[in-house]
Amino acid sequence: MKNPFSFLKVAPHAKPITDAAEVQRLYKHYRVRVLYSMIIGYAVYYFVRANFSIAMPALLKDMGYTKTDLGLVLTLFSVVYGFGKFANGVLADRANSRYLMAIGLFCAGVVNFFFGLSSGVTTFAILWLLNAWFQSYGMPASVRLLTHWYSPTELGTKWGLQSTAHQIGSAGIMILAGSVLIPHFGWRGAFYIPAFIAIACSFFLVNRLRDTPQSIGLPPIEEHRGETHITDPNEDQANSFKEIFLKYILKNKFVWLVAFANVFVYVVRIGIRDWAPTFLVETRGSSIASAGFKTAGFELAGMIGAIGAGWISDKVFKGRRGPMAAVSMFLLMIAVIMLWMAPNNNPYLDACILICAGILVYGPQLLVPVAAADFASKKAASTATGITGMFGYVGSALSGLGTGLIVDRWGWNGGFLFFTIAAGIGTALFALMWKKRAPQLEKYHNSK
């Protein structure tokens, strides 16, 4: 009997295309197509994830919950999502990323629809745990697509473009939910409408994405770009999980260094994204719509930070990710202090500081998985980025419940002190990898 899940296996290699002009044409077409499809698809993942953040002020008011209640839901999401990024990172290295990404988005949409029908905190928590698991399909699938369709010498730049999906999705749902859905349909509308968008987009991904170049008869990307001298010729051959984990992950201290650094990136990033709307409504007199626009500014500005950090690390630092990440985290610490100390009744200043914070936090947020993929090689890229993602969502978990507990007990001063310390620790950890870059990039730049 045929396995009904055989479509999830890595796509088989198609008959190689021998016409050089046709190879060039198809590569140009599919590299653009895969990239814009990933951006759209992962942006919609955020429609059914970040909607919880903008709905929180209305949930607090309408349902009578405490910040600790909702912070617990955020933390549970982060724990499951972080573990899921690791588990599904291992899966993604052996799966068809085209279908993996689409299935995760479809299921996340279904869960969001039922979340909109619910009311109790326990039900919220259970459904958001399910959402976390399905959300964790998105990034590992994207990593596999990125590392197979783009070579190591361009990975930072292309990854920076793909990562704009974070900001497009978060900003889009902040504006849509804050300005239209919640004012007209209540907080439940912030879950129903994005759910239908996500389900529709999952079919778009199946139509647009392709697992690897070889699955449509194209040569590997390094061969196409004339960079086979910097890669392991056996990199695409199957290995056991144990062998890959021991060789490329467990004994690689730099994978673990960027993983630990990611804890503190996520404390600040998720802290601002999830709690800024509530902070602005409670302390700065913002409406939900105004807070949504300001937080959207934080997210949209992150596109500049992600693209800029990827390009600078590729072109200026020649594949070294540490310098850009360390400088960005240091400046982020200053931005957090400025937002903390800013005077009341100055909404434009709040917006400007949040824009700066967005630029600064999304640079390191991008460079962590790029560095992990660099250090672990294409064979274990999804597994390595899954581990860094898992550590990142330890930070997210700390930021969710931790911020809720701290603010409930010590006010927003305690919350901002928490974010400031996290940014300082992140700066120090990234500085430890200042001179390090991937072995294949060392070969490339030493051969020039």
Image (cartoon, grey):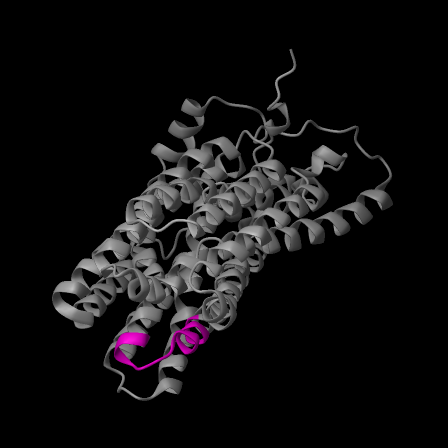
The structure residue drawn at horizontal position 29% and vertical position 63%, both measured from the top left corner, is 60
**Secondary structure mostly taken by the magenta-highlighted segment of the chain:** helix
Q: Is residue 305 visible?
A: no
Instruction: Tell me where residue 416 appears, x and y as whole percent.
Output: 22, 69
Span highlighted in magenta in the image: 281-295
Instruction: Tell me where residue 360 appears, x and y as whole percent.
Output: 40, 69
The structure residue drawn at horizontal position 18% and vertical position 72%, both measured from the top left corner, is 413
The structure residue drawn at horizontal position 53% and vertical position 65%, both measured from the top left corner, is 172
Seen in the picture, residue 311 relative to 1 is either above or below; the reply is: below
The structure residue drawn at horizontal position 62% and vertical position 50%, both measured from the top left corner, is 201
Can you name the residue that lies furthest to the left here? Answer: 409
For the residue pair 282 and 239, the one nearer the viewer reads as: 282
Query: Quick check: 65 left or right of 245?
Result: left
Q: Is residue 201 visible?
A: yes
Seen in the picture, residue 292 relative to 154 is either above or below; the reply is: below
Residue 289 location, quadrant: bottom left
Is 34 within the magenta?
A: no
